[in-house]
Image (spheres, helix red, strand yellow):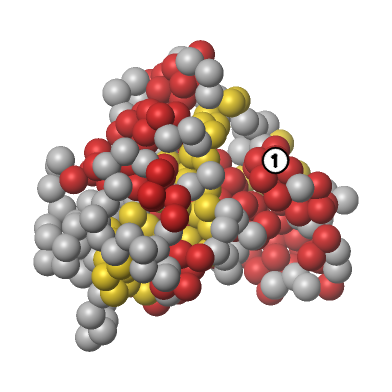
Amino acid sequence: MNTARPPLCLEPGSPSWPADLDHIDGRPERIWLRGRVELLEKKPRIAVVGSRSPTPYGEAQARRFAYALAEAGATIVSGLARGIDSAAHRAALDANGATIAVLGSGVDRPWPTGPLTDEMHRRALLLSEFQPGESPRPHHFPLRNRLISGLCLGVIVIEAAHASGSLITARWAADQGRTVWALPGRVDHPMSRGSHRLIREGATLVESPEEIVREILGEAAVRGDARADRGTQLTREEQCILAVLQGETLDADAVAARTEIELQTVLATLVALEVADLVVRAPGGLYRRGR
């Protein structure tokens, strides 16, 4: 990662200071930023959080929700952890949208490291209340979670076990007066227990990103007015995938094999096509052409 440029430090009252943090318990004394600082002013902000060890279903739903929300104009906030967090950040970047990672370490020592982290530094924003040079520590992450929810209008919990850091974020969100959305999962899977517990306790059950888009951005965003001419703006990958799905119902692995496109790119592209109603996801992880 290029660390030549020092992190920007903001204090309460600074011109770019996020006012949302002024109204939470334990307001940070300062925050450090690295990357596209202007993204801090882009609203609405929605957090997408969940397990570090998600099921394929959970990871696909994180991509689906983050991509659709980012494309509709929301800024996706998460914690850069492996699993749901990384899937949400990646989907937002794939949608050419805005995304912010709130860290449990200094912004010059993000964890985990890797290609996504490097890309977040170039195209997105890293934020932390921990001073530069601070290494990630276990007790930092529950504190980090209050900033994830505090920055946002609401928090989407994709998958969470019964005892999960995502539940801490949801608790912070509820205490801060933010909306908590929870995605239901299989009743017999441990990764669904935390989400189902939140729903029983009053979180809003959500099944489609369009429900959230409609709630926070209005009906025009759901219709995708900005992409009304969608059919004439298909990428090469989208064209290839639609071609192999002509008259076929295939899973993502089969689509990747037939198009010779990397599986992760296929999954992200299928999400985009599904949001545009050009692909329909059938039971069993299968996909077919839409309208």
Depth order, front residue of 117/56: 117
At horizontal 62% and vertical 52% (from top left) the residue drawn is 69
User: For the residue labelled by badge 1, is the local secondary structure a helix, a strand or a loop?
Assistant: helix
Residue 142 lies, with reference to residue 136, above or below; the image says: above
Q: How many marks?
A: 1
At horizontal 44% and vertical 55% (from top left) the residue drawn is 19
Residue 268 lies, with reference to residue 284, above or below; the image says: below
Percent x, y for residue 209? 65, 42
At horizontal 39% and vertical 50% (from top left) the residue drawn is 21
**From this viewpoint, is residue 257 visible?**
no
Q: Is residue 29 left or right of residue 267?
A: left
Residue 248 lies, with reference to residue 70, above or below; the image says: above
At horizontal 40% and vertical 29% (from top left) the residue drawn is 175
Percent x, y for residue 260? 57, 66
Tell me the residue that label 1 is attached to. 215
Residue type at mark 1: give it. Answer: Glu
